[in-house]
Amino acid sequence: QQTLRSMVTSSLRFGKSARVALLLLVGISLLASTAAIDAPGGKPSSKPKKQTLGNYAKLFLRPSKSEADIDAYAFVIPGKIGWAAKTSFYFGLWYFFNIFYNVANKKALNALNLPWMQSLACVGVGTPYIGLLWLLGIQAAPKLTSTQFNALAPSIACHSAGNVGGNIAFGSGALGFAHVLKSMEPAFTAIFSGVITGKWKSLYEYAALLPIMGGVAYASASELNFNMLQFVSAMVSNVGFSLRSVWSKEIMSWDRSVTKMDGPNTFRVLQVGSTLLTIPFVLAVEGWRALFPWTHPNWKAAIGKLDHAGQMITPAYLWSQIILSGLAFQLYYEASYLALDAVTPITYSVGNNIKRIVIVITSVIVFGQKMNTQSIIGSGIALGGVFAYSMISDYFANQAKAAASARKN
């Protein structure tokens, strides 16, 4: 009987690992398949008709909207396939690092309950990587005037607030439900964009926000582990990241040939600035020991306990989760910019929604966090509303571009 119980326990553990691995593969496949929506058609391209396999490999991490045919010596790979392979890889990286960030981040938060310190890790762990990119000339370092630095301050503050708010939300309740709450971010972005820029969207776009807010409200009313701290923190994160998005667009409109502030570099500057800004708040809220977490009482209290999966918490366990979450946070944003540069915004939105759904499912599988029927329905309505908003918003953006082009002609 004991042997049978051991076999069943082992098979369940394997089954859980297998389900997570299968989810990774399915998620990557789904995200990759969205790239097919943007597969280059028969439109003429300024690219050469054929390129060598070596050149294709050399430029593999340089996204493009189309790809020339690839001379693979024995045969020729069509450009469409080469483009789809690159783009699928970007989407896969984006998803892969995002899943690892969410899992490692949640493990660190569960073990230590130091959300401000964990927020500092998310922005700070990647700064040596950023410094190396700039120092070694792999990426051009930003060149900003003092006026431009001052203009960056609100974006840095909002990036910091969004990061901290998100971590408090992730740590104070179910990870999946926190992501449902954070699915309201497009609604905040749409409203703040109109208030700040004076450019309001169509009535149809704002109407598409209603399912998002209604779905979140419906899911919240039934959430078994609902707590106000998680709700408020998630809303703070939504406000912070939404304002960051609006102001970052203005920053990226500066002359890039001078400032070198493309999408990835803008994010890197925000990461470095947020690191400096978050440190004093960590000191004020969690004390100086949080900057040296191995000296903090929460660290000592966590050692020797078991995590959600029954794994012993050791110093190596804690360090690995903190460092992994910080690196994955940096890299998933980097990968998302690669994906965004290779596809249209609508395809990017589709991929982003699939990613959020898979993260919700992952949290249920990995952390055993349950969702009742009403919560699942509400979450589905909210995520479907985000998708509908993306579609409608992209449609009206294309209409505006076409009208502007017609006026020029």
Image (cartoon, rainbow, N blue to C red):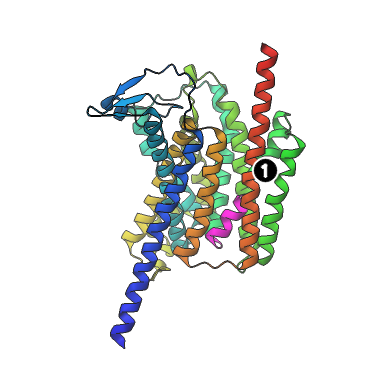
Q: Between residues 206 and 127, which one lies in front from this camera angle?
A: 206
234 inside magenta stretch: no
Image position, residue 211 (x, y; %): 70, 51
Q: Between residues 49 and 311, which one lies in front from this camera angle?
A: 49
Residue at position x 63%, y 39% in the image: 391
Amino acid on which the number 1 mark rests in the picture: Phe
Residue at position x 59%, y 37% in the image: 244
Q: Residues within 10 Å of mark 1 (few under 14, many from 20)?
A: some
Residue at the extreme left: 74
Side of 392 relative to 89 (left or right): right
From the image, which quarter does the N terminus lie in?
bottom left
- Majority secondary structure of the magenta segment? helix
Up-down relation of residue 65 to residue 126 (above or below): above
Figure quadrant of residue 127: top left
Which residue is labeled 1 in the image? 188
Count of numbered badges drawn on the protein: 1
Span highlighted in magenta in the image:
172-184
Residue at the extreme top: 409
Does dot 1 land on a helix, a strand or a loop?
A: helix
Residue at the extreme right: 203
Q: Between residues 345 and 294, which one lies in front from this camera angle?
A: 345
Residue 39 in sight in this render: yes
From the image, which quarter does the C terminus lie in?
top right
Residue at position x 68%, y 34% in the image: 193
Image position, residue 136 (x, y; %): 31, 27
Side of 360 relative to 392 (left or right): left
173 inside magenta stretch: yes
Up-down relation of residue 152 to residue 329 (above or below): above
Image position, residue 20 (x, y; %): 40, 60
